[in-house]
Amino acid sequence: MSQLSNLLLYIPGIIIFLVGSGQVRRYLALKRNGTVYGDVVSCQHIVKKDKKDREIYNYYNVTVEYTNPETHHKERHAVKSASEFAEGQQVQVFSEKRTGNYEIIENETSFVINPWEMMVGGALLILLALFTNQGKQVPAMICLALVLAGAGAALIFDYVSLRKRNLEPVTGEVIRVYTRQISRGTKIVKGDKFTYYPVVKYTADGRENIRKCSVNSSNEKSFKVGDTLTLYYDPDLKTVFERNANKFFLILGIALLAVGVLAGASILSVL
């Protein structure tokens, strides 16, 4: 293998580890600062342009009212957000103790494999690349077997945990399509590239809500205003998920777990 090929083997593990660690850091930050539930009082769309009609600012100025858990007094704070919210919508708010800035915990991607598992899987893939480059076949095969078995177990756990939630289907109506530019055209790659996200309105627990979904497409015609999407509401957690338990992930998880266990057994038999 060339030196470049050897280095490329590390990239998947590093990416997976960084994605997982980023989510874990955010979870720990929220745990450290604490969160409170509040109601959206107002939501104003702010767009500012320069003299050449180019956008400088594009955000929502959201005013949230909540009860301070320490003083038990109601407080209102204006928060800048990239997402729109309906008046009366319940949101989670936390303040960064170091800066005193307030932030709305917006809808985040629900990973099939949770961030802690992603970090472990990324670390194992990095070790797999290291042992492969060193020519150590047995340790490399052990890492591969652990990755396969771990990924399978994580998929099975995700399916079982979603089934236990007894999620209630909720119909969301697409009210707008959010467009995000991800790259500009160059001499090599022609045309600008965009990603499209549906913004849906739905009712859960008697409240009207607005949500920018994480599902997306590079095709401009994938989502149209008036289309409907099925979301899933957990009344216990008061949380809406964009996906429910999927048997495909269960079958894939069982297959990966079986392959990982068989690979591990074959390694042990030759030691």
Image (spheres, rainbow, N blue to C red):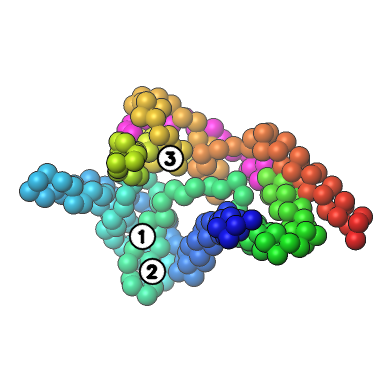
Task: Tell which of 77 and 269 is nearer to you.
Answer: 269
Whole-number angstrom distance, CA of label 2 to CA of label 1: 8 Å
Residue with the most extreme left position: 51
Residue at image location 49% in from the left, 47% down from the top: 109
Residue at image location 80% in from the left, 60% down from the top: 138
Q: Give residue 213's mark.
A: 3
Say whether marks 2 and 1 touch (CB < 8 Å).
yes
Give the x, y percent position of residue 242. 51, 39
Q: Is residue 57 left or right of residue 136?
A: left
Task: Tell which of 191 and 122 is nearer to you.
Answer: 191
Whole-number angstrom distance, CA of label 3 to CA of label 1: 19 Å
Q: Amino acid at mark 1?
A: Glu
Residue at image location 18% in from the left, 52% down from the top: 56
Extent of the magenta region: 156-177
Q: SS class of the residue under badge 3? A: loop
Task: Tell which of 225 and 22 is nearer to you.
Answer: 22
Say whether marks 3 and 1 touch (CB < 8 Å).
no
Q: SS class of the residue under badge 2? A: loop
Give the x, y percent position of residue 147. 71, 53
Circle 2 packing at 10 Å, graded few (<14), some (14-19), many (20+), is some
Residue underneath mark 2: 96
